[in-house]
Image (cartoon, rainbow, N blue to C red):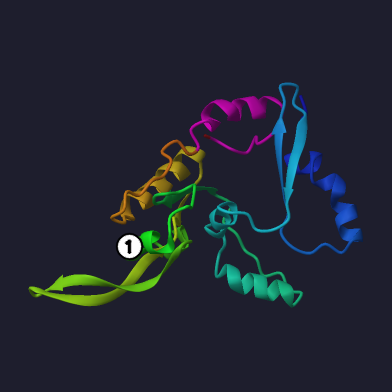
């Protein structure tokens, strides 16, 4: 067993000099798997902010992520992050994930609950501001509020000192967001890690994480 193991050290770090040599600038992720012998195998590069990964990372950013990226373009790194575990849950509507529905079918559906959760814990995706009918004092009026404009509606995130606490926090946000068009989302985010984390830690990886 490795005394100190890092997925970064074993996969992405070896190509760091090459990335510097081509003057690569920007986000880069490497997806990988760890086999039963404890060897990390790279699977793919993502040379852009991936979804929903970047939206989940935004929950850890202290301050406005856009401001940090603007500062970075100017050569100044002002990034400050929360080191808690972050978990995200995608909330979608039919016909996700096929996206064969017409724009008319997935646009203009009101999204409720945005004002009930901290702004850094929700990342609107296929959403916009729009006018919807509302009953006020017995009369139907038009009000402006968040509405859908696609099937991949929003990413709800949660932070916590452990995986289970972050998962609980994320689903509390999910419970406060609703839209009347059969919202769908996975209910098992983070569940597999309960069994997989001890296997990773057996090989010295992710030892700082607690489920």
Quarter holding the N terminus is top right
State the image coordinates of residue 13 (x, y, percent, origin top left).
82, 47
Residue under numbered circle 1: 109
Which is more toward the observer, 113 or 101? Answer: 101
Please, is residue 146 above or below residue 100 in the view?
below
Residue in view at x 9 percent, y 75 percent: 137
Q: Quadrant of residue 115?
A: bottom left
Q: Secondary structure at mark 1?
A: strand
Q: Is residue 119 visible?
A: yes
**Of 61 and 88, which appears nearest the observer?**
88
Is 196 in the magenta? yes
Can residue 6 be seen here?
no
Residue in the image at 59% along x and 71% along y: 66
> Which segment is the magenta one?
190-210
Task: Return the x and y of residue 70 as percentages of the image width and height.
Answer: 66, 75
Above/below status of 206 relative to 56: above
Q: Is residue 47 left or right of residue 180?
A: right
Marks counted in the figure total 1
Is 181 in the magenta? no
Q: Which residue: 55% across, 25% down? A: 195
């Amino acid at each position: 067993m490795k005394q100190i193991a890092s997925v970064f050290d074993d996969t992405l770090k070896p190509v760091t000099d090459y990335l510097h040599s081509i003057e690569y600038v920007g986000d880069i992720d490497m997806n990988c798997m760890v086999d039963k012998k404890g060897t990390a195998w790279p699977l793919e590069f993502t040379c852009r902010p991936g979804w929903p990964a970047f939206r989940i990372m935004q929950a850890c950013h202290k301050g406005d992520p856009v401001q940090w990226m603007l500062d970075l373009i100017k050569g100044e790194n002002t990034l400050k992050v929360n080191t808690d575990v972050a978990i995200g849950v995608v909330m979608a509507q039919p016909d996700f994930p096929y996206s064969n529905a017409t724009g008319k079918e997935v646009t203009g559906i009101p999204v409720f609950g945005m004002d009930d959760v901290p702004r850094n814990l929700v990342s609107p995706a296929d959403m916009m501001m729009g006018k919807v009918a509302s009953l006020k004092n017995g009369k139907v009026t038009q009000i402006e509020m968040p509405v859908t404009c696609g099937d991949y509606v929003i990413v709800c995130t949660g932070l916590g000192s452990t995986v289970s606490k972050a998962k609980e926090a994320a689903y509390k946000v999910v419970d406060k967001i609703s839209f009347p068009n059969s919202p769908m989302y996975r209910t098992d985010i983070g569940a597999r890690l309960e069994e997989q984390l001890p296997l990773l830690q057996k090989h010295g990886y992710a030892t700082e994480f607690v489920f």
